[in-house]
Amino acid sequence: MEYAEVRSRDGKQVWRLRYSSRALSWLERNLGLRLPELENHMGYTESVWVVAAGLLHENPDVTIDDAHDVVDAVGLGVLETAQQAMQEQMQPPEDEDSPLQPLNGSSSKNAGGTGTKQKSRQPASG
């Protein structure tokens, strides 16, 4: 899993934001919102919680005050960086050889796994 790195304005401190499954679950619990609902409720406070969730991997006891300290040190741009990093890290891989394949039949591979699309089975007219 990748990290988004943010640096304090004076360049002396660096934080890495990572949005693992644990971080996303922690964020939902602390906000009382499911991730799909978050986009419609994203205000300043929720954005700071997103920063806190990204810090969780380095500090399991992270608090909202810790996240506010990062925002103060980095600047308000960290809020957008954190939101973008969370969105990017939640996207499925684009690699065709990824073990994550859709289960709804939208994959281009057929059930035999040959990688070819199934031919249409229309009844013969006659």
Image (tube, rainbow, N blue to C red):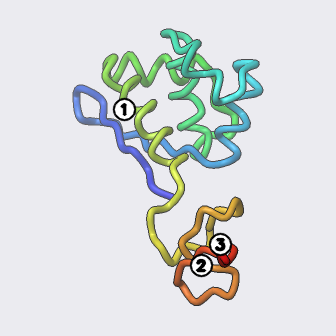
Asked whether 120 or 59 is in front, the reply is 120
Residue type at mark 2 is Gln
- The local crowd at label 2, few if under 14, some if 14 to 19, many if 20 or more residues have their Cα within 10 Å, is few
Number of numbered discs visible in the structure rendering: 3
Q: Residue at x 50, y 19 (%)?
A: 47
Residue type at mark 3 is Gln
The reply, left or right, for residue 11 in relation to residue 119 is left
Which image quadrant for residue 114?
A: bottom right
Which image quadrant for residue 59?
A: top right
Q: Position of residue 102 (x, y in %)?
A: 64, 62
> In this figure, which residue is indicated by the disc labeled 2?
118
- Secondary structure of residue under mark 3: loop
- Secondary structure of residue under mark 2: loop
- For marks 2 and 1, give the one nearer the viewer: 2
Q: Which mark is residue 122?
A: 3
Would you place residue 98 above or below residue 112 in this image? above
- Spatial CA distance of label 2 from label 3 is 12 Å
- Secondary structure of residue under mark 1: helix
* Pointer 2 or 1: first along the chain: 1
Q: Residue at x 53, y 15 (%)?
A: 42
Q: Residue at x 73, y 22 (%)?
A: 30
Would you place residue 110 above or below residue 31 in this image? below
- The local crowd at label 3, few if under 14, some if 14 to 19, many if 20 or more residues have their Cα within 10 Å, is few
Q: Which mark is residue 81?
A: 1
Q: Position of residue 14 (x, y in %)?
A: 36, 40
- Spatial CA distance of label 2 from label 1 is 43 Å
Which image quadrant for residue 112?
A: bottom right
Asked whether 74 or 123 is in front, the reply is 123
Would you place residue 62 above or below residue 49 in this image? below
